[in-house]
Structures are given as C-alpha cells and as structure tokens.
Image: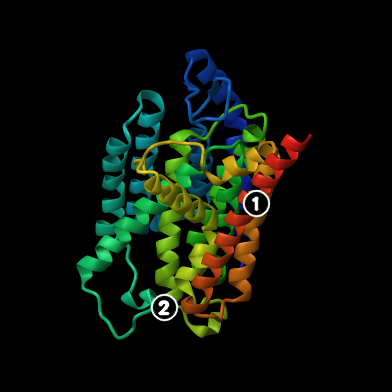
C-alpha cells in the first residue's frame, strides 16, 4: 500500500488553509462580518466567522492535485452536495436563516447525493436479518441519518476548538479505515479535511481569532454524514481478508460520533422534558457542563476530545462484538458520564457555598 498520498494531501490542505485564514480574518473584519453575540452563546466579543471558506479551499486544492479526474467524475454528486451545503452555510452566516429554512435548504444536497449518488446501506445493518425492509424505509432512514448527523455536528460548535477537534478525530478514523479497506480516494478526501481543520484550529484555539460558522460546520457535518453512511455500506460488504470489518456497524459509529450523538440526544431529551422546542438554543450542551465545572475552553475541549478518543478505542477493541453488546455499553457509559458531570457540578456548588 502506498501511504505517500495519504501523508502529502493533508499537508497540502493544511498549508493552503493556514495561508488563507489570516487574509480571510483581515477581510471579514474590514467588511464587519462578525459572529454576533446571542443569549445562548458564551463568547462576549465579536469575532470573524465563516472559517469554512478557508477549510473548503484547502480541501479542494489538495484534492485537485492528488485525485485523478476519473475519481472526480465518480464522486461528482458528493462534490456537488458538499458545495451546495457550503453555500447554504455561507448564506446562513451572512444573512441568517431560521432553523426550519435551514433544514429545508439542507434537504437539497442530501437528496442529490442519496438519489443521484445512490448512497444507501443494506437492511442487514439494522440487526434484524429475518426482516427485509422495503426500499422506501431504507431511503427515509438514510435521509434522516444525514440530517441528524449533519445538524448534530453543527450543534457542538460552541467552544473554541471543539468542532475542529471532534472533526479531526472522526475524520482521522474514517481516513485510516477507508485506506485499509481499499478505498484510497475516500481516504484522501477524509484526510484532506483533517489537514485543513488542523490549520483552522491554529486560529480557532482559545482565544479564537475566527469561528468555523455554519459555512464550516454544515460542510464538515455533511462530509462526516457521507462517510458514516458509506462506512455502513463498505463495512457490511468488505471481505474478511482485510481483517478490519466491525461486527457492530451502528455501535461503532455511535462510538466514533459519540460527542455529537451524545450531546444532541441529551439536549433534545432535556428540552422535550421541559416542554421546549428541540430547535430552541440554550446552554445545556456538554461543553456548557464542563464550563460550569470551572474549566476554560481549551481545558474543556481537551477533556471532551479525550472522551471521543476513548470511545473510538473502545470500538476498535470490541470490533468483534455485535450491536447487541456495544450499543447498550455505549448507552450505559453515556449515562455514567452525564451522572458524573452532574455530581461534579453539585459538589462544586456545595464546596463554593461552604467557602
């Protein structure tokens, strides 16, 4: 296996993004295009947004150099979809979209890649081999998975560096796994995004000089969704000769995507229990819980990133176990983490009163 492109492509993407971001910061500041301070946000100053512009530019330049034209044609609906999602995020960052309008806008690139790109997975990954699900059920499941994963990633973009670190961990896993699964060009795409995000993190780490914005969060969320669904399909059909298939496809994805999955699930459950809209912004995300414990942005991101890595390692160690084993284990661990955070906050509050 030739690993040279897998090392070179993220380096090219890193350099391009690293060179573009300072120019973008200066230009956005001059045009007074800032990320506004709202009630649910934790930043107290105005900072340029739309970091996704430089991220996507770095990815495109790197892939234009490394990928043959035939692969661009083969993956044309993926690139059309990512470009449309990029412009939807750009539109939202500049002029603003209501949650419903944003959701409707996202359906266009998702439908293009699912219908024309024939992105899907087999019914056997649902763990019920005796039941054959009709095509329209699988279609709706794929669309739902795309929408939920894309927006779950967007929702975690609340701390300096958090979305970037999560994206690096998730896409590094996909980049390496697809390479060893024989899908070298899918690997190149994932690793090129990793390179661009790493350059972005240099300017997004606390104190942040630029935010990712929906331009970047929706773009990266869309790409992660694509790889997640493609992982299900490839993992289901890959031969044992590769020695890398996971017996628990869905459980593995839950581990890899644990931060957006866990965070979105707990926030939605909390809002519904309070009789609030799931779309209503608040300060109950997992990163807010770490901030309540007195950690700053960087300390919180490091701890959340460590949780993500720990779950990825867990999935690798238990790759021969079924969904019936891994998924309940993930749920129990998430409940324990949630309980531990609440217990720590309660203890911290008690200690503060005692002082």
Q: Hey, which residue is sitting farthest right in the picture?
A: 355
Residue in the foreground of this view, choosing between 333 and 178: 333
Give the structural element (helix, strand or loop) at label 2: helix
- Which image quadrant for residue 144? bottom left
Q: Residues within 10 Å of mark 2 (few under 14, many from 20)?
A: few
Residue in the foreground of this view, choosing between 131 and 54: 131
In this rendering, which labeled residue sits more in front, label 1 or label 2? 1
Where residue 148 sits in the image (x, y, percent)?
38, 52
What residue lies at 34% left-to-right and 36% top-to-bottom? 88
What residue lies at 45% left-to-right and 59% top-to-bottom? 227
> Taking 218 as reference, is 169 left or right?
right
Residue in the foreground of this view, choosing between 42 and 223: 42
The tag on residue 237 is: 2
Answer with mark 1 or mark 2, whichever residue precedes in sequence. 2
Total numbered circles: 2
Residue in the foreground of this view, choosing between 204 and 27: 204
Give the structural element (helix, strand or loop) at label 1: helix
Residue picked out by circle 1: 343
Quadrant (top left, top right, bottom left, bottom right) of the C terminus: top right
What residue lies at 52% left-to-right and 78% top-to-bottom? 325
Q: Is residue 298 visible?
A: yes
- Indicate whether 64 appears above or below 129: above
Q: Is residue 13 visible?
A: no
Quadrant (top left, top right, bottom left, bottom right) of the N terminus: bottom right
The tag on residue 288 is: none
Q: Hey, which residue is sitting farthest front in the picture?
A: 354
Where residue 131 sits in the image (x, y, percent)?
27, 82
Query: How far apart are the two marked residues, 1 and 2, measured between alpha carbons?
Result: 44 Å
Where residue 324 sits in the image (x, y, percent)?
47, 78
């Amino acid at each position: 296996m030739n690993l040279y492109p897998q090392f070179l492509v993220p380096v090219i993407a890193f350099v391009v993004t690293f060179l573009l971001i300072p120019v973008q910061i200066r230009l956005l500041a001059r045009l007074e295009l800032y990320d506004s301070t709202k009630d649910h946000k934790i930043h107290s100053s105005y900072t340029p947004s739309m970091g996704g512009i430089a991220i996507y530019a770095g990815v495109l330049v790197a892939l234009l150099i490394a990928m043959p034209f035939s692969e661009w044609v083969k993956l044309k609906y993926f690139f059309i979809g990512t470009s449309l999602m990029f412009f939807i995020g750009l539109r939202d960052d500049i002029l603003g979209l209501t949650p419903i309008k944003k959701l409707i806008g996202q359906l266009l690139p998702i439908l293009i890649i699912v219908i024309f790109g024939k992105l899907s997975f087999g019914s056997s990954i649902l763990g019920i081999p005796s039941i054959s699900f009709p095509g329209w059920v699988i279609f709706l499941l794929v669309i739902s998975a795309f929408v939920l994963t894309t927006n779950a990633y967007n929702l975690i973009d609340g701390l300096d560096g958090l979305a970037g670190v999560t994206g690096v961990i998730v896409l590094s896993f996909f980049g390496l796994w697809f390479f060893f699964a024989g899908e070298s060009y899918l690997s190149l795409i994932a690793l090129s995004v990793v390179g661009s995000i790493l350059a972005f993190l240099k300017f997004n780490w606390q104190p942040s000089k630029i935010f990712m914005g929906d331009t970047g969060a929706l773009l990266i969320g869309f790409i992660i969704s694509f790889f997640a669904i493609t992982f299900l399909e490839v993992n289901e059909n890959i031969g044992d000769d590769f020695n890398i298939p996971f017996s628990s496809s869905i459980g593995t994805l839950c581990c890899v995507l644990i931060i957006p999955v866990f965070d979105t699930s707990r926030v939605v459950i909390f809002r519904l229990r309070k009789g609030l809209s799931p779309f209503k912004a608040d300060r109950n995300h997992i990163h807010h819980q770490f901030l309540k414990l007195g950690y700053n942005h960087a300390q919180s991101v490091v701890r959340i990133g460590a949780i993500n890595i720990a779950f990825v390692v867990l999935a690798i160690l238990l790759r021969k176990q079924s969904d019936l084993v891994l998924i309940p284990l993930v749920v129990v661990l998430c409940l324990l983490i949630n309980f531990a955070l609440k217990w720590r906050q309660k203890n911290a509050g008690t200690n503060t009163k005692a002082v």
